[in-house]
Amino acid sequence: MDGSRNHVIRTLETVKRWGRLNSPWALHFNTGSCNGCDIEILATLTPRYDVERFGIKLQGSPRHADVLLCTGPVTRQAHDRLLRIYAQMHEPKYVVAIGSCALSGGVFADCYNTLGGIDQVIPVDAYIPGCPPRPEAIIDGIVKLLSSLQPVELQMEKETV
Ligand code: SF4
């Protein structure tokens, strides 16, 4: 009885994981960017680049989001908000740092009011460089992150197709 129950739980977990990785909901948070990277993210969401074809959908609430897209250096003002948003997201959650400022502080690195890149405050799973990165680079980075999270068997299946 326990064996079949475990099998059902494992199957449900696999389905849940498959759904999450094939239709991730993303939350966008500007931690202090100049808005250049944010405009590129918005362009990525338009029909021209059509990021929804990968199942990626913008979401307004951290409680419903799987992926946090961060732009800009972390300012002292945004620090607590970033921590709160990250804490409100459910597990498993992934963070993507978009643009040079989110990676290292960029042009704002030595400012008195910035703390550096996103990974100075929360763990980052993918880094997309550029000032700002083009929509193609943003899509490439997110898709690579999601592919790397697929179970190994599924990755091998995709490579042989
Ligand atoms: S990487 Fe460039 S475009 Fe993006 S927030 Fe920094 S200065 Fe602005």
Image: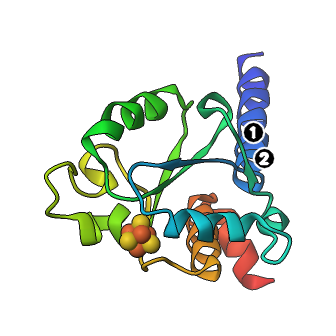
Instruction: Give the class, few, some or many, for how many residues have Cα within 10 Å of label 2's Cα (few <14, many ≥20).
Output: few
Q: Amino acid at mark 1?
A: Lys
Q: Establish if 12 lies above or below 2.
A: below
Residue depicted at 58% across the width and 72% down the height: 138
Q: Position of residue 69 (x, y in %)?
A: 53, 54
In this rendering, the count of numbered labels is 2
Tag 1 near tag 2, CB within 8 Å: yes
Circle 1 SS class: helix
Q: Depth check: 12 or 52 in front?
A: 52
Residue 19 numbered mark, or none: 2
The N terminus lies in quadrant: top right
The C terminus lies in quadrant: bottom right
Residue bearing mark 1: 16
Residue depicted at 43% across the width and 80% down the height: 130
* Residue at far top of view: 1
Q: Position of residue 117 (x, y in %)?
A: 28, 58
Q: Position of residue 123 (x, y in %)?
A: 35, 48
Q: Is residue 128 visible?
A: no
Instruction: Give the class, few, some or many, for how many residues have Cα within 10 Å of label 1's Cα (few <14, many ≥20).
Output: few
Circle 2 SS class: helix
Q: Depth check: 131 or 50 in front?
A: 131
